[in-house]
Image: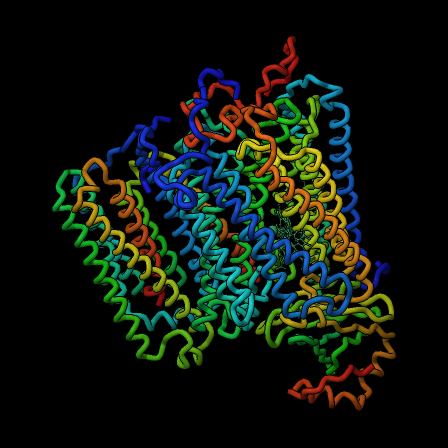
Amino acid sequence: MDKQDINTEHSHGYGIYVLVWLGLLALTGLTVAVAGINIGGFTIVTALLIASVKAYLVLAIFMHLRSESKIFTVFALVAAFFLIISFILLFSDYSFQ
Amino acid sequence: MASDAAVIETNGNEPSYLDYKGKHSGIKGWLLSTDHKRIGILYMIGILAFFFVGVFLGFLMRLELISPGETIVSAETYNQFFTLHGVIMIFLFIIPGIPAIFGNFFLPILIGAKDVAFPRLNLFSWYLYLTGGTLALLSIVMPGGPADTGWTFYIPYSVRTDTNVILSLSAAFILGFSSLLTGLNFITTVHRLRAPGMTWFKMPLSVWSFYATAWVQVLATPIIAITLMLVAIERLFHIGIFDPALGGDPVLYQHLFWIYSHPAVYIMIIPAMGIVSEIIPVFAHRTIFGYKFIAFSSIAIALFGSLVWAHHMFTAGMSDAGQLIFSLLTMIVAIPSAIKVFNWVATLYKGSIDLATPMLYVLAFIFLFSIGGLTGVMQGVISIDIQLHDTAFIVGHFHYVMFGGTGFAMFAAFHYWMPKMFGKMYNRKLAKIAFWFIFIGFNFLYFPMLVMGWLGMPRRYYDYLPQFHPYHLISTIGSWILIIGLIIMFYNLFKSLKSGPIVTEKNIWGGETLEWQIDSPPIHENFTEIPVIEERPYVYKDNEPPVEKEETV
Amino acid sequence: MSTNTLVHVEVNIHRDDIGARLGMWLFLFTELILFGGMFIIYSVYRFTHQEEFHLAAQELNTIIGTFNTIILLTSSLTMVVSIVAIQKQKRNLSLLFQMLTIFLALFFMVNKYFEWTAKFHHGIYPGSDTLLNENSGHILFFGLYYMMTGLHGLHVIIGVVMISFMMRFTFKGIVTYDNYVKLENTGLYWHLVDIIWIFLFPLFYLIT
Amino acid sequence: MSSGASNFVGSVDGVFLLSIIISVFFLVLITTMMIYFVIKYSRKRNPKAVNVHSNTLLEVTWTIIPLILVLILFWYGWVGYKEMVDIPEDAMTVEVTAQMWLWKFKYETGKVTDSLYVPVKKAVKLILTSNDVNHAFFIPAFRVKKDVYPGTKRTIWFIANDVGEYDIACAEYCGLNHSYMYSKIFVMPEAEFKNWLNAVSDEDPKLLEELTGGDEYNSENQ
Ligand code: HEA
Ligand code: HEA
Ligand code: CUA
Ligand SMILES: [Cu+2]
């Protein structure tokens, strides 16, 4: 492994970030609006879905995961996998009680 | 690694890391050192000190249990003893144990690096460790005394008792962060600092196991951190989270506790397995059998280990689906361990075996860990566990895996690496005598627990029914035999540090990993020149028979 | 924690920015899982006390919540812009945006302060009689509310401290256009704080 | 299934025996192999080792065989457990309350005791709850155990096979006198039990009073 590789350059320019920011604001508006209408059990699902999209945008663009080396994404998936699996197994108890 | 000897030429004139003079000298040169080897030694001092406290408490507990009724201490004191004993042994001795001492010292050397990725963070972890340890012991002198909850801190007792639970909780919290930062450091080190040519499948098996362990540390520790913090806050502010009096669910606490604490048992054992995989080929003087299977089984254990936590809760009233899934997964997690055991035994086949002290400890490890593991499998079978849960059987099981497993592996590592770390040799004969005392005493101490557990002797019992007296008596006598062994062993090691014969040879055991190609003790930067790795580890070229009849991978 | 700082003079002080970021990401995962543990508790109680959580959530002010979400999202933008600025060697611009980030963070905290004190005035705080007289779902909801937003607030404060250090480093020329991994790691941390809020917001304010 | 003190003993002890057989087999196998190799290939006898790298067939074998064995164990454990949660409709009910550090048993007639009395060969269902912290209801001879929590109710059941008395222990750590939280279960012939249940013992009021806060605690009515 080359010890001297210093920095991977990330995409420059402000434009993309401002766009993402606008997108995030729009999604916030959307999620507030959706919460207002009564769609029963789907409320929480849509809210979490929108939150996930927002989180993805922040991760991929603001946090440069998209332009970082693959291993970072793999790591992130490992962490997410751990949380999700704990979640599922825990509910194997609670949802059948 | 049989890379050309020419690549690694250590300069005989450079001072060893022990004599090295940096910016600071004297005691400061140690306390402020970011050298991974010195930090490893610092950990060793801390961990051994706490170990002696823990072991002494174990000794007192056995003394109390030698006969029914009050023998030496009151019930309250006994309850505090086993809690403190558990907290010290788990959080201060066995979890940090091998990674913090031997991982710190040898991981960078084994991958051909000069240090870990974040040396200052490494030192910081040690200070966290020291702080946590001090907090845990501080409760002894505080009014109210140490916590009496058991190391599991089950709600609601832990919010009701008057003892210093918060102190123990914060100790565990801080120690968690120390362990987590070590893990983070090791992952980054393995990814970024391997020597040129050191591909993943050329890494020594102990590196694989440190790597797998580090992941468990990083992923599971935050869960216990937050859980224990919530208990502390619940005690302080009456926030309703787990306390049933405030609507909370005490079983949820148990889930969260074990989400960490089951993987934690693999934090304890995987590094020990790494040590075993390191030592066996050296003393059998042949290549390891099934390198890839051993490497992958470390990862598999780490992976599946996160999925079985609720086998500690089979009597807690989980749903049937929960019982089924967790019992099934527990069975499956035993398989990678089985694979390792068989591969180790197979490595002895056609070897040229030298039964030196490290090897003795390792063989004892295989035997004792098998007993511990097989009893673990029994506990994983739901209907059996209904009978065994919270009995002395469990106590027997976990001492077999933790002490008989990790403890013995650690003792093996002391005897194996001591000449490299300090350039001194112990008395080999005395070491073997100590071994036999420890091994025999160990079985007398813990085997009776398995029997009486099945017969219905619950754990965390200060007093017991007369029919269990014979077992307790044998157990206590076993602890005395064990004491003698431990005292001889540590006496031998400490004495040799001071006045043992000096080892100048680089490779006294005939090992083939990188640490045996550098000075004993190593120089400050480990290598004068970073080695270039060309071969797999454990090659033992001179063993290759003239006619190629070796089976290939 | 980015560079290897051995004192030995001959050592080539090597720099490994990727390694530094890798370490930072690993740390972020631990933070994520720290909150993940609380999200797990939240989801279990929400599952076992659906109706009660529903009602309790109505007592939170959606307007303040939305407002704070916007503030935090904007601060993420200013943070990332400050990094682009330093890459483009515009040190002062970068300083300005770092300052803006801190400013927005403080704004967020002030809002939070008013929100919490308003609740306190209504007698809803941990261990209060009003709260303890409510049903258990209510107690749990507010227990989690205080714990989770409190822990998040703590992270915001830590973030402010970190960014302040970065401003100092930028000012002194320690963080420069070709060596800004410290600032970048701070940014990563800050975005994580944002992500956590992105989930906290709907779970507490929007499930009414 | 008439062997053992309760209806569960047979199946639990059966799996336990099976697991011991498997365990001893593997333990002996591993240990003798180790000792044999250590002697046969000692450095004196065998100064030159041979490198054997790996053998996929062997690896697969010793993965599959233990896997099958543990799955068998799992299955019988699961079956045994299912019995323990399938409570018969006609079971007699006793409400059990745990508190630091004693047990209370309340029968269908309203009678309260601090030892458990049950008829032989009849299904008994216990409803468990706690007044303070966690405890666990454990009858070692019957192979039954269940954690007891404040605020919720859990159930267990069993059929006692033989007349006699057995220990009840608390198996979940619950503070100072956890190790003294013992009680007894008396298994009586059905007729005798009926008589006992319907007879108003003169010690009962005292027990009741104690439940509601009376202080001095005397031995139980036998
Ligand atoms: C180092 C620590 C360590 C390790 C490695 C293990 C390993 C295992 N443990 Fe253990 N365990 C503890 C430490 C550990 N445990 C502790 C501390 C507790 C108690 C906590 C408390 O309550 O205080 C506990 C409790 C505990 C319980 C809960 C019991 C109860 O409270 O009711 C269970 C239940 O399933 C269990 C199971 C297992 C299993 C299946 C393994 C497996 O990983 C074992 C795998 C190994 C083998 C199987 C042996 C080698 C293989 C062979 C010899 C080949 C043949 C094998 C087969 C045919 C299967 N353990
Ligand atoms: C690695 C972990 C570890 C180790 C090594 C030990 C070691 C010992 N433990 Fe254990 N133990 C635990 C982890 C460990 N323990 C845990 C986690 C629990 C559960 C706690 C809970 O329930 O919450 C427990 C619980 C536990 C119990 C059950 C308590 C109960 O349920 O009532 C008992 C009872 O006998 C016991 C005994 C011992 C003994 C006798 C030793 C012996 O190994 C000690 C041997 C040593 C001596 C007998 C003393 C000799 C040495 C010296 C005095 C110093 C020598 C000085 C020089 C160097 C010169 N331990
Ligand atoms: Cu009640 Cu232990
Ligand atoms: Cu476990």
- Which residue does the image show at 36% across and 41% down from the upper left? B24
Please tell me which residue lies in front, B94 or B457.
B94
For the point 76% across and 49% down, the residue is: B444
Q: Quadrant of residue C102?
A: bottom left
* Residue A15 visible in image: no
Locate residue D146, reporting x and y percent.
Answer: 67, 65
Viewer-proximal residue among C138 and C13: C13
Residue A60 rendering spot, x and y as whole percentages: 30, 42
Where residue D167 sits, quadrant-wise, is: bottom right
Q: Image quadrant of ligand 3?
A: bottom right
Q: Residue D219, position in %: x, y?
A: 78, 82
Say if B359 sits above or below C95 in the image.
Answer: above
Relative side of D45 to A97, left or right: right
Is residue B272 toward the left or the right of residue A25 in the image? right
Return the x and y of residue D161 as percentages of the image width and height.
84, 66
Please state, as top left, top right, bottom left or bottom right, where the C terminus of chain B lies in the image: top right
The colour mode here is rainbow
Outermost residue, front side: B499
Residue A60 in view, yes or no: yes
Q: Tell me what residue is drawn at x 67 percent, y 72 percent.
A: D177
Q: Give left or right: position of B385 versus D149.
A: right
